[in-house]
């Protein structure tokens, strides 16, 4: 299949002799030692496909050669219901994990640290900080399970069009990005102070927690929102451009909504942040650059916030907290993303599924 074939793909759910699910006869033939009929899967995957103890009860699928990253879940075996059920299950599991971690954090605050809980003036504590980050980190195994069991796809395709995470190839961009964003957030915090100025009582605990857990939390959000949600929605549309636009809008809107901000300027920032990282993911062929931006952004803001402000008010997203100064943040993230696109182009990052992969 050539790249030009992708604008006229078969409707989702359509099957052919080359992409239909493996018939029972094939399974019988495989277990009896009879050669398996051709036209189902590559030999390296046949045993896992036909043996239910080795694979989930859906066909392991590979994206078509030439597909861009947002379209890598639209495979020959794609079905309309799989993204719908996958998203619903992911949300339910995340909500359950969030409730459990929140209750555990509150219990730790009361039993271990002797703090009182006042719902009318809830402030962020180190325990609540951990309780907020852990459910987000759990989006990684949740996404892995859904991608594997509902879509039958290897987790490597969540990373990039090369079926792997190419973080090592970012090289010097990783420390450079972190240093630049640390400097930027220092200037931004001093120029546009929000919240309570001055270090809070538990600034060191917030600093340590942020450095240790925020990289995993930010990467997990990219893996779910851009790595699964965007691709899942995009898989419903045959035209790559339309698939990308709808997948980006849906994932960005839900990403903004998940932050629970009541301030319109904050919501605009989160929306633009999600759109920018979706575009970055498409232009670089994978999640790596978007993960780097998100990780560096969150870690740098937490480090600066812990040292210069009271982190107990860090999650205050009520109306009036934001303002037109958030446009500076939006432009800064866009410039960072543009720099990473340039960086990856110089290092020949693949932006489409190579011909050696996928189901032709």
Image (tube, grey):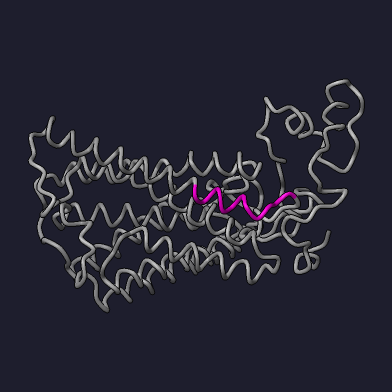
| Residue 83 is inside the magenta segment | yes
Q: Is residue 357 above or below residue 5?
A: above
Residue at image location 14% in from the left, 51% down from the top: 122
Residue 27, quarter of the rendered image: top right
In this view, which residue lies farthest toward the top?
32
| 253 is within the stretch colored magenta | no
What type of secondary structure mainly makes up the magenta span?
helix
| Picture quarter with the N terminus | bottom right
What residue is shown at x 55% (from left), y 49% (from top)?
85
The x, y position of residue 59, in whole percent, is 72, 41
Give percent across and percent down for residue 78: 70, 52
User: What residue lies at 8% left-to-right and 39% top-to-bottom?
Assistant: 115
Q: In this view, does 6 lie above or below 206?
A: below
Residue 274 vs residue 215, the one in the foreground: 274
Tally of numbered tags: 0
Compare residues 316 and 107 and report the one nearer the observer: 107
Identify which residue, 120 or 190, lies in the foreground. 120
- Residue 169 left/right relative to 358: left
Query: 256 or 307: which is nearer to us?
Result: 256
Q: Residue 284, image x and y in percent?
A: 58, 61
Q: What stretch is highlighted in magenta?
A: 77-88
Query: x%, y% of residue 202?
Result: 13, 44
Question: What residue is drawn where x is 80% and y is 65%?
Answer: 5
Instruction: Using residue 334 as the reference point, say whether residue 36 is left or right of it.
Output: right
Residue at far bottom of view: 324
- Is residue 21 toward the left or the right of residue 229 in the image? right
């Amino acid at each position: 299949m050539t790249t030009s074939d992708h604008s006229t793909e078969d409707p989702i759910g359509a099957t052919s002799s080359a992409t239909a699910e493996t018939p029972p006869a094939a399974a019988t033939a495989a277990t009896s030692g009879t050669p398996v009929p051709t036209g189902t899967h590559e030999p390296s995957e046949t045993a896992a496909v036909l043996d239910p103890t080795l694979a989930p009860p859906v066909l392991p699928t590979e994206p078509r050669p030439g597909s861009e990253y947002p379209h890598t879940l639209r495979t020959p075996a794609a079905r309309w219901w799989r993204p719908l059920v996958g998203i619903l299950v992911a949300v339910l599991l995340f909500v359950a994990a969030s409730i459990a971690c929140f209750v555990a954090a509150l219990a730790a605050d009361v039993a271990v640290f002797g703090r009182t809980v006042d719902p009318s003036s809830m402030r962020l504590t180190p325990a609540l900080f951990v309780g907020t980050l852990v459910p987000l980190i759990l989006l990684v195994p949740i996404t892995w399970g859904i991608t594997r069991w509902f879509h039958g796809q290897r987790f490597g395709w969540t990373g990039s069009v090369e079926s792997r995470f190419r973080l090592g190839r970012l090289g010097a961009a990783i420390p450079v990005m972190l240093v630049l964003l640390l400097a930027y957030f220092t200037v931004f915090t001093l120029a546009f102070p929000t919240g309570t100025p001055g270090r809070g009582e538990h600034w060191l605990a917030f600093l340590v927690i942020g450095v240790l857990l925020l990289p995993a939390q930010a990467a997990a959000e990219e893996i779910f929102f851009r790595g699964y949600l965007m691709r899942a929605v995009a898989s419903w549309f045959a035209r790559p451009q339309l698939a990308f636009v709808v997948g980006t809008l849906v994932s960005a809107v839900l990403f903004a909504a998940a932050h629970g901000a009541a301030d319109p300027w904050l919501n605009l920032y989160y929306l633009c942040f999600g759109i920018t990282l979706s575009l970055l993911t498409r232009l670089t062929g994978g999640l790596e650059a978007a993960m780097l931006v998100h990780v560096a952004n969150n870690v740098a803001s937490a480090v600066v916030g812990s040292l210069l402000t009271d982190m107990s008010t860090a999650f205050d997203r009520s109306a009036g907290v934001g303002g037109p100064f958030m446009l500076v943040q939006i432009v800064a993230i866009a410039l960072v993303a543009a720099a990473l696109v340039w960086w990856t182009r110089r290092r020949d990052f693949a932006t489409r599924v190579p011909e050696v992969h996928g189901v032709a």
